[in-house]
Amino acid sequence: MKAAGALRRAVFLDRDGVINAMVYDTEHGLIDSPQNPDQFQLLPNVGEAVRLINEMGLLAVVVSNQPGVAKGKSTMALLESTTARMERELAESGARLDGVYYCLHHPEATLEQYRGICSCRKPKSGLLRQATEAIGIDLDRSFMVGDGLTDIQAGRSVGCTTVLLGTLRCDSCHLMSDQNAFPDLLAPDLLSAVRLIQSRLGQP
Ligand SMILES: [Mg+2]
Ligand SMILES: [Zn+2]
């Protein structure tokens, strides 16, 4: 255990739909995560948002389910070069990530080594806990920003303040109450979410 004073506040960030745009797979008619660096495109104002997290003195930590390798849609090399592109594009805005944690598992993975029920696939909290172990994070005073209810569940389960990106619809309200996944805050995009967090930090 690290001393309480050494623990830092973090903003945990989901990746797809928060940092980068989703990709439309015309072949299968599906909306999917980018599976290679060429498909990776930062969403508007994300560089500015992450830089603001850096400037506030909070850790910016990506926590993302990435089962593409397990499903044979991508490779470790492509996933790594996609991560490198994300970091390079953020750096162009003077923004820096303090950690990137991926869950590579999936219950129906085609690659056996990644098949199974793990403790890190969101809505579980394993990725947030791994980051906490590695960097020293005060979870109760940290934030989780995501565009899915599984992000909200993962954040809530470890005591983070949660921010859901997007607009609230009636059908999502049912889901939220069924799954105990009500977010603490709502924002249209990452930059708005970070500004909300900033105003929260300004409060006593
Ligand atoms: Mg997402
Ligand atoms: Zn996992």
Image (tube, helix red, strand yellow):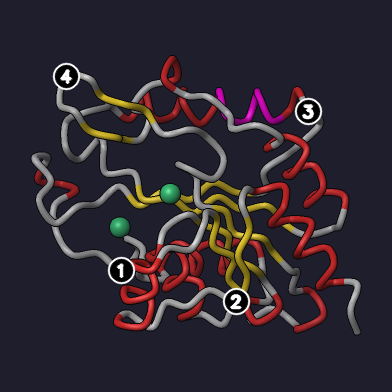
Q: Residues under labels 3 and 1: Cα distance?
A: 34 Å
Q: Residues under labels 4 and 1: Cα distance?
A: 32 Å
Q: Position of residue 48 (x, y in %)?
A: 78, 38
Which amino acid, by three-letter code, is at mark 4? Answer: Glu
Q: Residues under labels 4 and 2: Cα distance?
A: 37 Å
Q: Is residue 111 left or right of residue 119?
A: left
Please give the residue where the numbered disc 2 appears in the rendered image. 184
Q: Which residue is at 47% across, 69% downward?
A: 152
Which amino acid, by three-letter code, is at mark 1? Answer: Ser
State yes or no: Cβ of the residue under disc 2 lies below 8 Å from any atom of ligand 1.
Answer: no
Please give the residue where the numbered disc 1 appears in the rendered image. 119
In this view, the mark in front (3 or 1) = 3
Residue 27 numbered tag: 4
Q: Earlier in the sequence, mark 1 or mark 2?
A: 1
Q: Secondary structure at mark 2?
A: loop
In this view, the mark in front (4 or 3) = 4
Q: Which residue is at 63% across, 82% downward?
A: 1
Q: Residues under labels 2 and 3: Cα distance?
A: 28 Å
Please give the residue where the numbered disc 3 appears in the rendered image. 93
Q: Earlier in the sequence, mark 4 or mark 2?
A: 4
Which amino acid, by three-letter code, is at mark 3? Answer: Ser
In the image, the segment drawn in magenta is 85-90
State yes or no: Cβ of the residue under disc 1 lies below 8 Å from any atom of ligand 2.
Answer: yes
Which amino acid, by three-letter code, is at mark 2? Answer: Asp
